[in-house]
Image (cartoon, coloured by chain):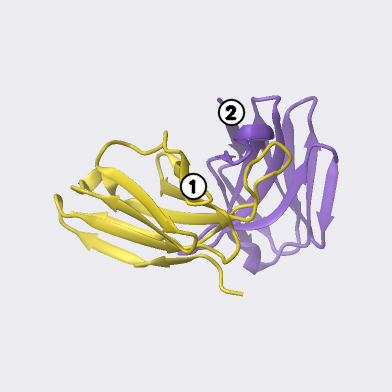
Amino acid sequence: GENVEQHPSTLSVQEGDSAVIKCTYSDSASNYFPWYKQELGKGPQLIIDIRSNVGEKKDQRIAVTLNKTAKHFSLHITETQPEDSAVYFCAASPSGAGSYQLTFGKGTKLSVIP
Amino acid sequence: DAGVIQSPRHEVTEMGQEVTLRCKPISGHNSLFWYRQTMMRGLELLIYFNNNVPIDDSGMPEDRFSAKMPNASFSTLKIQPSEPRDSAVYFCASSPRGGDSSSYNEQFFGPGTRLTVL
């Protein structure tokens, strides 16, 4: 089955700096890669996703890049703000009959220091 | 728009008791998922329903766990009897897609139920 590794497990940045979280996956059949943000006491919230037919996607201060050859994808947050502090999860999903299966990374706890 | 609704938000029970967790998916979504989140194991898929039918229950830990979806707007996850190792946060998620060969799965999570079994 799919295995998703996520690094780092914790990340502290100064407000205004950039944050980068990286994930690798093992199954070459995976071609949907969402990122979730989980605030304390809440459920994971989908913040951005990328599909295998594109290499990069941006939405305001967040961007995701995908390298299918190397089987890794990354989340980039620019101009970080205290409200970006949360746990971020990457995930991978195959197409076809198993496309409901999201395999999650273990999460990255991001702390933005004012 | 109302998101996924879960109840109760917190449940504390004693070992051996029956626990029932409830979920109302987003209206119009035809896929529903139950997940368990722990520090040790992260987010694990327990069961997946499509059009109210259980499709994949391979993640259900053991026979003490059961899930039902009697209609498109309601699902339950039951643990009987409960054990301390069942303590975790249980999430329900729903998706507008059916997981067929041409679709991807955008899943929307509820706020979770924090279960503590003493």
The residue depicted at 76 percent of the width and 45 percent of the height is: A50
Image mark 2: chain: A
> Residue B76: where, in percent of width, then height?
36, 57
Q: Which mark is residue A76?
A: none
Indicate the colour of chain A: purple
**Where's the N terminus of chain B, which quadrant?**
bottom right
Q: Is any part of residue A84 visible from this angle? A: yes
Question: Which residue does the numbered mark 2 point to in the structure image?
Answer: A2
The residue depicted at 37 percent of the width and 39 percent of the height is: B60
- On the rendered structure, is B92 left or right of A71? left
The vertical placement of B78 against A61, above or below, is above
Image mark 1: chain: B
- Callout 1 environment at 10 Å: few (<14), some (14 to 19), or many (20+)? many
- Callout 2 environment at 10 Å: few (<14), some (14 to 19), or many (20+)? some
- Which chain is painted in yellow? B
Question: Which residue does the numbered mark 1 point to in the structure image?
Answer: B49
Q: Dots 1 and 2: beta carbons under 8 Å? A: no
**Where's the C terminus of chain B, which quadrant?**
bottom left
Question: What's the amino acid at mark 1?
Answer: Phe
Helix, strand or loop status at disc 1:
strand
Helix, strand or loop status at disc 2:
loop
- On the rendered structure, is A97 left or right of B90? right
> Residue A92: where, in percent of width, then height?
64, 38
